[in-house]
Image (cartoon, helix red, strand yellow):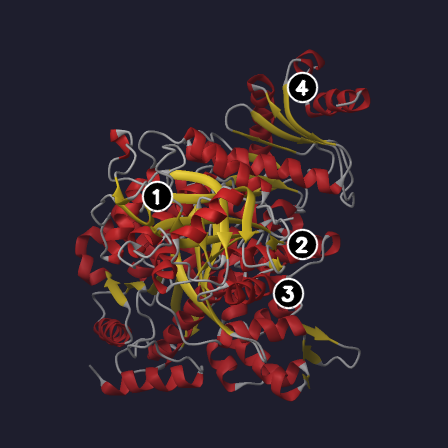
Amino acid sequence: MANEQLDEAHRLLGELQISPDVNGKYFSGYCIWLGASTRDAGIRQLAKELTEVFEDLGAEVMTSEQVGKEYESLPRMREQTKRAQMIMMLAASPGVSARTLEMCFESRDQKSECRGKTYVYIPEQYHDGFIHRRFCHYNLKIRSKDQAQFAGGRTAVLRQCISDMTEFAVNTRRQAMQREKEFKPEIGIVTALPVEFKAASLILTGLRVDAVRAAGGPYQEYHHGTIASQHGGNHNVVVARAGKGNNKAAVLATSLLTQYPSVEVLLMVGVAAGVPNVKSVENHVRLGDIVVSDEAGVIQYDMIKRYTSKAEYTAPPRPPDPKWLTRAENFIALSPARPKYWSYLDDLLKELEGRRPPSGPLRDSPWVDGRTSARQPPRPPKLAGRPKVHSGPIASANTVLKSAGIRDKIRNLFHIKAIEMEASGLAESAWQSGKGYLVIRGICDYANDDKNKVWQPYAAAAAAAFARELIETMGPHTAG
Amino acid sequence: MDRPDTKALEETLEHAGVSRPSARKLHVLDFSNRNKARNRLVHDSTNRLLLDLVSSNDVGTCIHVTGEMRAITDPLHRQVCETISLRKGEGFDILYNLPPALAADVFGTVGWNLDNWNKKSPGRWQERLSAIDLIANGGVDLFAYDTSDLIQYSVFGHRYILLQEKHSATAQSKRVWLLDSPKVHDVLACKAEQILDLAMDVDETYFKTFTLNLSGVAARRYLNRLQRAGALSRDVLLDDRLVQELAPDPLAPLDALSMMDFVQVAGDRLYRITPAGEEFLAMLSLGGVPRHGE
């Protein structure tokens, strides 16, 4: 290839203030259809140079020479030009001019995008001619250059082609960026642990990272994406990680709601300790199960008034969002025999390289009926190896609880199904901001002496998979 | 619905060419009186219904008979149009009130829409430009016709009609009905198709040309220079080596920037960049050229 042509291209890109991508390419992923005469030696050479320059800049180039006689077939040509983001026709010869006109004429009936992306390079000497007038009639993008420039080694047509490709690519980028800027999530998912953050991010389509470093504010990384609604359309969702504890959850939730005022509901999605109850099959929560907050919401059990001889729980009630609560309750009640989130869970486990740990008897302390371990209450065979979804109050405090005695005391007081460390901070932030919330927790331990992290990946994935299907079942939202 | 609303429905349908007996038999899925917020809720129901129909591949022929096609400045409705266009390979047919005299060139066509959208609901430039992008990318199919005396409605899904009572172009709210009636649908769809045959097919590539004008070398040079210099005359802006070499019509990008209110001319006849122009330039200036589809 003539290095001078490539140098010229880089020089122009510099003048146009266009920078390359991380691979040093400018037009990666773009496909150009290049129509040029195969008979005229000068134009053939120019087309060859253009092809080499654009390929060097990262674009794929299809030329009429490469596709040969198929070029004569309009349906075939339509198929090929459909794939191209840009069509460049060097209309310095009657053959190419005629094909350009034919293509435009035909695409007008077909309502194809051909005309919108076709750039015609024509000698300015033809400015008053019939063909030029027809090109104008079809609203093609016409670029006139001196006829002598339609030859190898000349730079005017090359520079124009680069400029046009840049215009096209900048316009494409502008649209993409505008969509990004328009990102108005209606759902915020808050997580605490990295494994929860990863699982929740994996349920998004079109994941994109948005790092925010507001002056004087905390640094946050938000993951943007969508979840398709079963009712059509998409939910825009933002996912963030707070870290452990209610204080961090409250700070993150407030930052998120400030950054994205469009968020209507915060979902706390992650792992928690389950509250077993071997004497009540219905209420018994096992490892791998899912607990969703019910209308009682979150009980902050470390907000107490302590007297000499007693303690009084004083946390104000913060009920979850009624829309999401209703949806969750209906979803749980009407869930089919094999809900979709089971397969989402399988997929997530593959991505997280996790698996469902083997189930075993409940090892609890204080012991159950004087035994160190108790047989798990039976489950229907269809639930074997699958999570059961519970709905109930969830206890929350800045305490890593490893005491079955305290756990059972709280259970007896509030009928809780799970215990964790972030939901009350999130609930408070949502309440203070006039937004809704819902807590979805996968169960990874029993908050007793046997507490460990073995079930965390599975529980995080179960909560995220359930959240995904729950969101899918919610109808989309119309902007006001 | 109250009695006056029922009467208004019958009159509106009659005005649209549907007989009174047919109007009495139809099923009203949703209704809004003259209340802007309620109007939005009926449009919301319609968008949801459309998305359901798209999901079940039952969206049928979709035709809007409208005035200024403000519906596409709503993000959800744009999403609906894009989805229909992607699934069906053809977009909503939109019959709107573009004067035929303006339909013959880029700035007449796009400018008319921008003026009307701005007048009634001046909002963010991003919404207007996204609406233009939707058209430019073939998400809808436009037809110009004098719709000022017509009842405005949309037909879709073989049986559904979104009907608006007769209202002036400046009305902020009106009665709106979402109806389920195959019979009325067929009558109104047939009438819309008859008008489509008479209407002028608008060249959607004008909208593409407009957006490319905003992203080309000339627009970027103008905005950059105005940002640095503060105010410049038209002649000074046009006197630019790269613009002269590479912009086939150096005035067109300047006009496009003016129409989007990215630049403004003051009494001293000097151009200045606006806050919206600053935002737009920042968007264009971020990074290099992305991979296609990024």
Q: Which mark is residue A289?
A: 1
Q: Are marks 4 and 2 in contact (CB under 8 Å)?
A: no
Q: Nearer the viewer, residue A445 or A15?
A: A445
Q: Chain of mark 4?
A: B
Q: Amino acid at mark 1?
A: Asp
Q: Are marks 4 and 3 in contact (CB under 8 Å)?
A: no
N-terminal-most mark, 4 or 2: 4
Q: Amino acid at mark 3?
A: Met
Tell me, yes or no, whether dots 1 and 3 are on the same chain.
Answer: no
Q: Are marks 1 and 3 in contact (CB under 8 Å)?
A: no
Q: Which mark is residue B18?
A: 4
Q: Tell me the CA gap for discs 1 and 3.
A: 54 Å
Tell me, yes or no, whether dots 4 and 2 are on the same chain.
Answer: yes
For mark 2, give the secondary structure: helix
Tell me, yes or no, whether dots 4 and 1 are on the same chain.
Answer: no
Residue at the image position 51 percent from the left and 37 percent from the top = A327
Q: Which residue is mark 3?
A: B260
Mark 2 vs mark 1: in front: 1
